[in-house]
């Protein structure tokens, strides 16, 4: 490897892709290997995500097995699925042998069920096979589904010198040694050590005398979001996973948690925007439609509900037909306030900065709605009367309706996420179109009811 | 420390807070110290975030300086500001001495400018002082603003044995040893080593013979979001920071990156929800109003724009007044589609999965709008005609308008973020109320124009 190989300088250009495609077409294996050797596997995966399946398969067959397995892990999920379809069970098993147990289990879990057993039976390393089979049994949303079996573990009875000797063996299988976990005879987690501690200690000391008894851990059935919260809060880079009896089962590293955090944030963002499935910009039209249409339908039914409210009041409105012109104003305001309120509550619930006290929270939103409402209403009053020339009484009606609608929207936007959270439903589903739609309908209803009351039609 | 001290089991209960408050009131220092000793500093910070300032100050003065400095770092920003106001420059300097350089610089940067110099001048450790002063000079959104000076560095000329001896000294200042950075005589980064490599090597080997030449790094003026992207892509747990001449300046660890990712996600989510500043659910009414009112005003002007469009068409509409009832339907649909389209593009831009090809992207959204539009229009046609009893020609008008509005909203929602991104503006500002508002206005205008064309009023 040359000194020039600095990953951050990698840039995926059209020229580079063309160059790769050219080398594949002319079957110039030597130069292609030379070129790809200079790239990180994550970069090679980016290139393969851009070329067609046939070309990707060509490159995958060309690369050595260790690189291929890492590249496979980094491929876009859809592309990985296609590539795996084109590999035999034996070929997949060979890739699996090169991977850490957590990645290996993830790949196998993505396969169709009938292929899973076929691939597992082809894994030659019996220990690896047993560990992967164990991991496949855990729910993917739990600590067990995220952990790897690779870790460095020492018994409290060992000496520092013996420990270092044995760690040299264990560490070969572990990409990065974060912590050394100390266990007792029953394999139960009793503490931890860092490599640093071990280096600083005298070689004839017993592990029992130098290990740190305070150790964070998670139970194997803990929810991944909770694991992410704990690792973030305590700035942990790895955490051991234990069963009910404190027996050490595996460890979770922070890079997997980074992915969990990113996925969670993406999901919440998409839900707030009214997209119901995990989709990406380059997914198929069909997949995007399935993800987007449900919310549009909910919005449509809201719009039709609003239409029937307007139809109802329209019959008796008479000369106050001008009220209809300001329906979009009411609707937009109700929608915006609702989304703002719910977003703050949803984030607060996620960060634990909103406690369960609904009444306190609603009161605060009430005051906030009152303040925002008066500001908006005053400006609205001035503009409708002086710019649009609506009669004073109509402008006042609109202003009062704005205050009422803003307060109502703030309360609905706050109440729904807290209510859902208490029921154990992810409050993020409540933001976006769902709250916008209910606020549209209730906002317009409130508007006409207030107008009827003041104007007496 | 007892074996029972497991952080994950910490729970912030009302009883616990009451107990702490009780111990403070009765000045039962011994029991209070005993109680808090069992908690992680991040847990103590959570407790102090819940009690009043006077009580928090009492606890802070009681704890030893090392714990206090860690607790300070974990406090809610507003509370930390209040606590720091109540400490003398000398007291703050004492806390700073206990902190890593990156945290120390962050705390000082939060102080009012006149106090910053005062605190710095009170730091006794001259090296620490110089390093903090250096860090304060970097922009907080760059690698320099995020890095710490603490790292383990070895010269290529050292032997493994000499290296281990010296690392024992350096490692004392470093909480976690991720990588050992190898530099040449000019202090330029030339490679890396892991502790594992060092342990596995023979003690008389030269570093020059065993170090890994391939090393990732970032330039000191690199944007933090780019640093986060690189560390995620390559699964790095620490990355060295260098200047233009490759001189090693510091290192960034993954736990700081986790905070960057979380902050970015929170910011994007809030922007999509129309909240213009970084606020939290427990901020003051005033701060929340300032964050929320601007978007409500933009929404209001959109609503007023829609009102003038309706007023305009209303005059000639005659018997087609029923069209007004379906304005909320048009508006809600345009808003929802716009938010969906922009959210997907914004995320795609953030993940680099949307390349700069605007036309290709717009074409895809056009097709998507056509598919979604026809589905919504067909259902809309049926319901308006058969349920609402609107005349056939009006229902057809609404259906055609729905298709047109959905396509238009999808195109606007896609175009604006890509356009802003090309101009170097964060595309996340485009989602939420901004796009909703422009889609409201253009959607209603499109609706009436199509109606005028078909119905000929």
Image: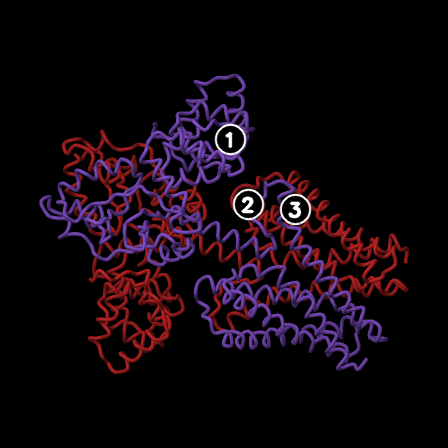
Chain colours: A purple, B red
The alpha-carbon separation of the residues under discs 2 and 1 comes to: 26 Å
The residue located at (46%, 61%) in the rendering is A350
Place of residue A37 in the rendered image (x, y in percent of width and height, measured from the top left)? 40, 26
Place of residue B192 in the rendered image (x, y in percent of width and height, measured from the top left)? 28, 37
Which of the two discs, 1 and 3, labels the residue nearer the N terminus? Answer: 1
The residue located at (31%, 38%) in the rendering is A175
The residue located at (45%, 33%) in the rendering is A72
- Depth order, front residue of B223/B410: B410
- Left or right: B326 with respect to A77? right
Place of residue A100 in the rendered image (x, y in percent of width and height, measured from the top left)? 36, 38
Which residue position holds label 2? B349
The label shown at residue A289 is: 3
Q: Secondary structure at mark 2?
A: helix
Quadrant in which the C terminus of chain B is drawn:
bottom right
The residue located at (70%, 55%) in the rendering is B334
The alpha-carbon separation of the residues under discs 3 and 2 comes to: 20 Å
The alpha-carbon separation of the residues under discs 1 and 3 comes to: 25 Å
- Give me the chain letter of mark 3: A
Res A40 visible: no
Q: Residues within 10 Å of mark 3 (few under 14, many from 20)?
A: some
Is disc 3 in contact with disc 2, using a CB cutoff of under 8 Å? no
Q: Residues within 10 Å of mark 1 (few under 14, many from 20)?
A: some
Discs 2 and 1 carry the same chain letter? no
Q: Secondary structure at mark 1?
A: helix
Of the two numbered discs 2 and 1 in the rendering, the one whose residue sits closer to the viewer: 1
Looking at the rendering, which quadrant does residue A442 occupy? Answer: bottom right
- Give me the chain letter of mark 1: A
- Depth order, front residue of A117/B441: A117
The label shown at residue A83 is: 1
């Amino acid at each position: 490897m040359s000194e020039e190989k600095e990953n951050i300088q990698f840039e995926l250009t059209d020229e580079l892709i063309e160059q790769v495609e050219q080398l594949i077409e002319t079957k110039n294996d030597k130069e292609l290997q030379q070129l790809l050797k200079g790239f990180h596997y994550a970069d090679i995966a980016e290139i393969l995500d851009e070329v067609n399946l046939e070309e990707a398969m060509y490159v995958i067959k060309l690369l050595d097995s260790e690189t291929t397995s890492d590249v496979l892990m980094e491929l876009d999920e859809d592309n990985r699925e296609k590539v795996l379809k084109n590999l035999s069970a034996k070929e997949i098993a060979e890739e699996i042998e090169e991977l850490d147990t957590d990645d290996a289990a993830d790949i196998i879990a993505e396969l169709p069920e009938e292929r899973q057993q076929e691939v597992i039976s082809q894994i030659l390393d019996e220990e690896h096979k047993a560990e992967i089979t164990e991991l496949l049994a855990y729910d993917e949303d739990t600590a067990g589904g995220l952990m790897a079996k690779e870790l460095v573990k020492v018994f409290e009875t060992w000496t520092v010198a013996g420990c270092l000797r044995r760690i040299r063996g264990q560490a070969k299988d572990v990409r990065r040694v974060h912590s050394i976990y100390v266990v007792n005879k029953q394999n139960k987690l009793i503490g931890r050590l860092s490599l640093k501690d071990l280096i600083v200690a005298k070689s004839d000391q017993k592990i029992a005398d130098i290990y740190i008894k305070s150790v964070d851990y998670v139970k194997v059935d803990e929810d991944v979001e909770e694991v992410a919260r704990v690792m973030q809060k305590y700035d942990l880079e790895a955490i051991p996973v234990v069963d009910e009896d404190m027996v050490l089962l595996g460890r979770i590293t922070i890079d997997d948690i980074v992915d969990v955090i990113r996925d969670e944030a993406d999901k919440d963002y998409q839900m707030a925007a009214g997209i119901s499935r995990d989709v990406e910009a380059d997914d198929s039209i069909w997949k995007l439609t399935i993800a987007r249409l449900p919310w549009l339908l909910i919005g449509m039914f809201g719009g039709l509900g609003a239409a029937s409210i307007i139809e109802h009041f329209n019959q008796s409105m008479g000369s106050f037909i001008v009220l209809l012109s300001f329906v979009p104003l009411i609707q937009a305001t109700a929608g915006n306030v609702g989304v703002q309120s719910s977003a703050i509550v949803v984030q607060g619930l996620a960060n634990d900065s909103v406690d369960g006290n609904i009444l306190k929270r609603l009161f605060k939103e009430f005051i906030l709605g009152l303040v925002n409402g008066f500001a908006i209403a005053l400006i609205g009053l001035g503009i409708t009367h002086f710019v649009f020339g609506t009669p004073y009484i109509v402008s006042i009606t609109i202003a009062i309706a704005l205050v009422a609608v803003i307060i109502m929207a703030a309360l609905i936007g706050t109440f729904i996420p807290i209510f859902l959270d208490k029921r154990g439903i992810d409050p993020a589903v409540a933001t976006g179109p769902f709250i916008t739609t209910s606020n549209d309908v209730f906002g317009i209803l409130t508007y006409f009811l207030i107008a009827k009351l003041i104007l007496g039609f």
